[in-house]
Image (spheres, grey):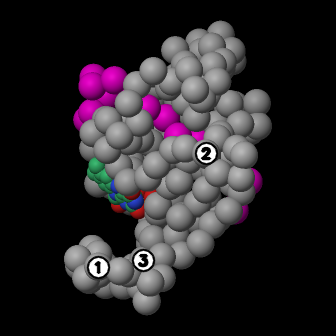
């Protein structure tokens, strides 16, 4: 039960700097259902406000296994961990769920959120999200040349905007 381990807070009660959380500590994006889910590490994204809602933007390349799950499901989660879990984030960021069943990764215990998303007991902070919008990065719209170098194989990210329906803090 997520309520036993985490307390509900509002997005504006998140004390940590969002640039550090996403860019340095990294996040684990998890999509699917408790009996069939997959997760991947991400360090690109942002959190803020859009359409009067607290939101998070996540960017997922189409070849990720996680992409299949986030496409299919209405909810997903974003989990943040303390430094002791860096190895797990490295594993989930370098190995595809197509090659390793990440549901069996030792050290990560899945839990279900009220909306049916999957997150992890070991997280320090969980954003429970409802997918409200997606779009694909359109190279014609790049305004600086540098960005194209990020995509030598033209695998432009699809970005998903998730409404943060609940923040859970340990
Ligand atoms: C620090 C770090 C940050 C990453 N950020 C992203 C990201 O924002 N978007 C993305 O598509 N892949 C990102 N990746 C790569 C995926 O996590 C990686 O390809 C992963 O193995 C995909 O797993 P999957 O195929 O099971 O979904 C990142 C990897 C690391 C190590």
* 88 falls in the magenta region: yes
Give the structural element (helix, strand or loop) at label 3: loop
Above or below 90: residue 113 = above
Magenta range is 72-89
Above or below 33: residue 122 = above
Q: Quadrant of residue 9?
A: top right
Q: Residues within 10 Å of mark 1 (few under 14, many from 20)?
A: few
Q: Is residue 149 left or right of residue 59?
A: left
Quadrant assignment for the N terminus = top right
- Is 103 or 161 nearer to us in this picture? 161
| Residue at 32% over, 35% down | 20
Q: Residue furthest top?
A: 4
Q: Quadrant of residue 6?
A: top right
| Residue at 35% over, 40% down | 19
Q: Which mark is residue 49?
A: 2
* Between discs 2 and 1, the one toward the N terminus: 2
Q: Nearer the viewer, mark 1 or mark 3?
A: 1
Q: Position of residue 131 (x, y in %)?
A: 69, 54
Q: Are marks 2 and 1 in contact (CB under 8 Å)?
A: no
Q: Position of residue 105 (x, y in %)?
A: 41, 37
Report the residue marked by disc 1: 144
Residue at mark 1 to residue at mark 3: CA–CA distance:
16 Å
Report the residue marked by disc 3: 156
* Between discs 1 and 3, the one toward the N terminus: 1
* Between discs 2 and 3, the one toward the N terminus: 2
């Amino acid at each position: 039960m997520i309520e036993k381990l985490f307390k509900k807070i509002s997005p504006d009660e998140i004390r940590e700097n969002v640039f550090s959380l996403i860019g340095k500590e990294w996040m684990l994006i998890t999509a699917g259902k408790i009996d069939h889910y997959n997760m991947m590490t991400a360090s690109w994204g942002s959190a803020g406000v859009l359409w009067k809602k607290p939101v998070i933007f996540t960017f997922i390349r189409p070849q990720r296994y996680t992409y299949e799950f986030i496409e299919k499901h209405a909810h997903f989660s974003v989990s943040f961990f303390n430094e002791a879990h860096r190895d797990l984030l490295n594993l989930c960021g370098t190995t595809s769920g197509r090659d390793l069943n990440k549901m069996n990764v030792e050290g990560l215990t899945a839990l279900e959120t009220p909306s049916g998303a999957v997150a992890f007991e070991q997280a320090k902070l969980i954003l429970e999200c409802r997918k409200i919008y997606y779009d694909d990065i359109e190279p014609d719209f790049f305004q600086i040349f540098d960005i194209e170098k990020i995509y030598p194989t033209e695998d432009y990210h699809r970005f998903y905007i998730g409404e943060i329906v609940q923040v859970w803090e340990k």
